[in-house]
Image (cartoon, helix red, strand yellow):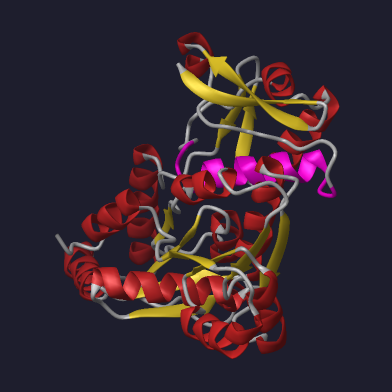
Amino acid sequence: MLAFQRNTGGRCQPIEITAKDYAKGVTMSFAIATDGEVPPSVQLYDRLCLAIASGVYPPGKRLPSIRQMAAYTGIHRNTVSKTYQLLKAKGFVETREGAGVYVCQRSGIAPDAQSQAVREGIERLLALGCPLTDIPSLVQGEVDRRLQSRAGVLVLYLQEDPGIGEILVRELAGALNVAVQPLAIEALADGPLPPKTLVTTRFLFPYAQAALGDRPGRLLPIDIYDYQTELKTVQEMPPHSRLGLVSPSTGALRLAATIIHSERPDLLVSTVLPQDTYRLEQIARAAHTIVVGHGGEAELSAAVRAVRSERTRPLHLLRCDRYVAPHALAQLKVELGLT
């Protein structure tokens, strides 16, 4: 039996999920606060995005039906339906006739499509006048060139949130011990494709895939950490506590604030970027707990020191050093030939 959350009258009530429910796709808590400032549709969307991005719902996994999700969360079926439609529009899920809603497959090109691509490539070389006997050496030379660049990694991010690129570069460079550089997804449309492995989160994978188009680049989605340990700490905070969130990523801050609101709508949550010294010191003065991760530790420490004499209660600091899921790092090392 798995603990689950049902929303009743704006409050999250624990219920039990049976093995039968689990088999139908209910694998994590989707607590929704219906009486808070964040609309239930936004809370559910972000919850599902996190579940997909962290691998709780892996590619090919069936989501709970609209009726099931509405029953488990206590929100209207139309709201669930619109949320599923938005996930589909963003490229996260697909509908299968008579079967339900499934997380999109990201496993690459199918074998038959690979064979077709090889045949088409050979035909194009022959049409250019290349002798058939020269094609193997040409292909091998290109393969060797790409293999030599496999240890080079480009982290893709959207220009509106460069902080997520900083987070991924910092973590992957430390874990992989290879050259890791950031690249805006929008830049993929300009110039030739860099001969390196491209990686991004499942949040951003549809955008990167669209920017890559039909070009033969190596694009890998990576799962993010599920933050269940940190969420447990948040759930145990005293009522009406003040919680500060510090991260260089505006997207990560927004997602975290929405999910925390779903779990604990009574908490007063403030978010801040590390470079905003004024707001950082405000949060350092008032917060009971501050969660900092993926950068910003030095700036937060300086802010805490600056306002230490103004605080009247102890400050609980929770550092989160992980953004990429451990299994995703291990898988990426295998993909890059680093193990």
In the displayed structure, 142 sits above or below 224; it is below
Question: Does 90 appear in magenta?
Answer: no
Secondary structure, magenta segment, majority class: helix
The residue positioned farthest toward the left in the image shown:
339
Q: Is residue 319 left or right of residue 17?
A: left
Q: Where's residue 36, x and y in %?
A: 83, 44
Answer yes or no: is residue 97 visible. Answer: yes
Residue 160 appears in view:
no
Image coords of residue 255 (percent x, y): 65, 56
Q: Position of residue 75 (x, y in %)?
A: 80, 27
* Front residue of this view, candidates 328 and 150: 328
Please indicate whether residue 156 sits to the left or right of residue 41 in the image.
left
Residue closest to the far front: 312
Q: In this picture, is 171 found above or below 307?
A: above
Query: As rendered, which of 147 and 333 lies closer to the eye?
Result: 333
Residue at (65%, 14%) from the top-left corner? 98
The quadrant the N terminus occupies is top left
| Apparent side of residue 201 relative to residue 46 in the rendered image (left or right) | left
Q: Is residue 45 magenta?
A: yes
Residue 156: percent from left, percent from top: 50, 70
Q: Residue at x 54, y 41 (%)?
A: 51
Residue segment shown in magenta = 37-56
Residue 111 higher or lower than 311, as above or below:
above
Q: How many marks?
A: 0
Frontmost residue, 175 versus 158:
175
